[in-house]
Image (cartoon, rainbow, N blue to C red):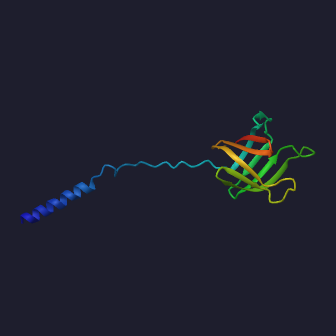
Amino acid sequence: MKTLKLTCLFVLSMLFITSCSSDDDSTTEETVKEEPTLVGEWHGVASTYNGVDFGSPENYVINFNAENLAEFTYIGYGDNGEDIIREATYEINEGVLTIDWQGAYKDMETMYIKITELTEDTLVIEYNITLDGVITETYTR
């Protein structure tokens, strides 16, 4: 009988020990920080050529969609003041944005653009236009 009482006491004490945990009632939620995305509409705000102010590209708009298609709009740059729109596919790999014009425009080849900053509100890109010239452009949403 004494063994039965000790066994019951042991089982009950184990129930109390294992059922009382300090973190059971905790409601901590892990916050998952999402990386900024390129998807969306970006408006040009600043441009430099080899570090010298190159004017504001406020008439440049780039729209990247989730299907890896990009639309470049140059507002008022046409011969008669109309908008010029260029479409391309894009991909990002290790901070390099590859724009593929897919042969649609004879004067445009595949471009490799370095993304130097990408936040929720700001996109800064850098690319070569000649052997000795680097353009840096800043865009905001």
- The residue at 54%/48% (across/down) is 33
- The residue at 16%/60% (across/down) is 10
Residue 141 seen from this side = no
Of residues 127 and 16, the one drawn nearer to the viewer in this rendering: 127
Of residues 88 and 116, the one drawn nearer to the viewer in this rendering: 116
- Left or right of 135, for residue 116: left
Rendering quarter of residue 58? top right
The N terminus sits in image quarter: bottom left
- Left or right of 22, for residue 127: right
Residue 25 placed where, x, y %?
35, 50
Farthest residue, direction top: 53
Residue 12 placed where, x, y %?
18, 59
Asked if 53 appears above or below 107 in the picture, the reply is: above
The C terminus sits in image quarter: top right
- The residue at 74%/40% (across/down) is 136
- The residue at 42%/48% (across/down) is 28
